[in-house]
Image (tube, grey):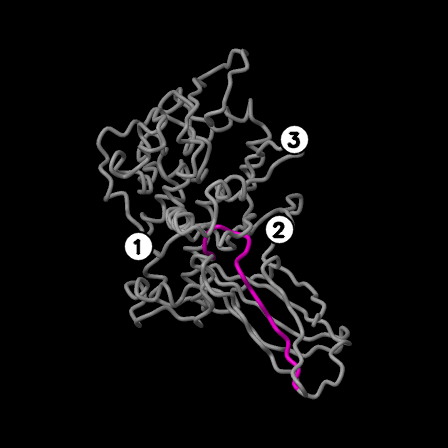
Amino acid sequence: MRRGIVAIVAASFFSLATLDSLRTEDDVPKSAYPNDSLSDGLSRIEQIKRCATCHPKEYQNELIGPHWASYTKLMEHISYVQTSPHYTDEWREGVKNKLQACLSCHAGSNLYETVFSGLESEANPARFTEENYPKLFYPPPPREDEDSRITGVDCLTCHARNNKVITHAGFKPSGIKMEGQCDVVPSVFFSNDLNCVSCHNFTFKNTMKNVSNGLVAAHETNCLKCHQEYDESGKGTHYYYWKHDPPQKKRPHSMELFHCITVSLKQEEAAQYIIFHWQNNNAPHGYPDCAEYIIELALVASARDTIPLGIERINRKVDQGATMKAIFKSGEPPGIPGYCNYIDSEPLHREYRIENISDLNLFKVLVTLKVKSQYWAGDAEARLIGSRIFDLKN
């Protein structure tokens, strides 16, 4: 069955795989990796600022987005878990031991100089396979220069190929002479969802599985269409929605997690039930990855008249248990098993029986959404996403 697809952003900060399942840079041969992209002897941050001279809006959006913050957020997390009481000793040890694997995506080498080498000039999408490009689904090696990692996933990571700039296939030169090292190469591969696959491997493969099974149409799965902000003219702004959106970035209503929720009232003879229903009807892939959504439900008639109904959880603890045993010596990560929210999952359906309330029409349902970056962290780590009032309907 085909479902309408709009966008959603996983609330975790690109927690794309369990630590033990990540491939490290040692799995990818390092032979002949170029290291002179667009440099002209400039530091990495100086090279990026040079990009900003012609692309100031894109640069400003990158500065407040998830890619630029990927390294700093990773290091903040590693530092934080060492002292937080809401994480286990096993996770603290795992984070330290797998740092190099994390850096592959959070501060990786330039993609088109490493794992995507040669793909920028490949015009036949049928050849975008591991058979033809064995490193396609690998993350790149981490950048060796620690000082260069501060920019996270930056302009060079996704656009640089030696002294060339890789961009979308529809690029047409303006005729204006471009100063500096800006030899632009339009690329069919760059315009494909596979351009994101190196670090977003699981999500991509899950999406393609759903396409193969007829659950979603291929043309509805474009990563940028869902995850990037667009201006009034329909041009992408180079800002990507994430859990730390600043106030000036208003994501479309259809991207909100509340879009997946319906609440209704059911009456059976003398019994009354509040029906809670959650269904992934807005993303072509499962979510979250390692994160957890906590959904708190309450009946409200006024600010002083609130009756808690229950708590629902959405996570992949059941799915990931076997993989995570390698990290958590106790056998499996802490946390409470929740609903696994794949596109082909049966909807989450709960019925709360209501007693001792004669007229439910006087009440509404308050739904409060929270998120934790990892489901095995304590609930004190949960961050408020927002709340919404739902009317009760028969």
- Closer to us: 108 or 122: 122
Q: Amino acid at mark 1?
A: Ser
Q: Based on the picture, tell me whether residue 297 belongs to the magenta stretch.
A: no
Residue indicated by mark 3: 233
How many angstroms separate mark 2 from mark 3 (CA)?
A: 19 Å
Residue 274 figure quarter: bottom right
- Image: magenta residue range: 271-287
Alpha carbons under labels 2 and 1: distance apart: 32 Å
The one of 6 and 79 positioned closer to us in this rendering: 6
Identify the residue position indicated by label 2 in the image.
254
Location of residue 389 by image quarter: bottom right
Which badge, 2 or 1, is on the more N-terminal residue?
Answer: 1
Q: Are marks 2 and 1 in contact (CB under 8 Å)?
A: no
Q: Is residue 314 above or below residue 170?
A: below
| Residue type highlighted by circle 3 | Ser
Check disc 3 and report its element: helix, strand or loop: loop
Would you call the spot at circle 1 few (<14 residues within 10 Å), some (14-19), or many (20 or more)? Answer: few
Marks 1 and 3, how far apart in space?
41 Å
Q: Position of residue 177 (x, y in %)?
A: 52, 11
Residue to which mark 1 is pinned: 21
Graded by Cα atoms within 10 Å as few (under 14), some (14 to 19) or many (20 or more), the crowding at tag 3 reads: few
94 left or right, relative to 391: left
At a point 66% along the width and 47% down the height, the residue shown is 247
Of marks 2 and 3, which one's residue comes earlier in the chain? 3
Quarter of the image holding residue 392? bottom right
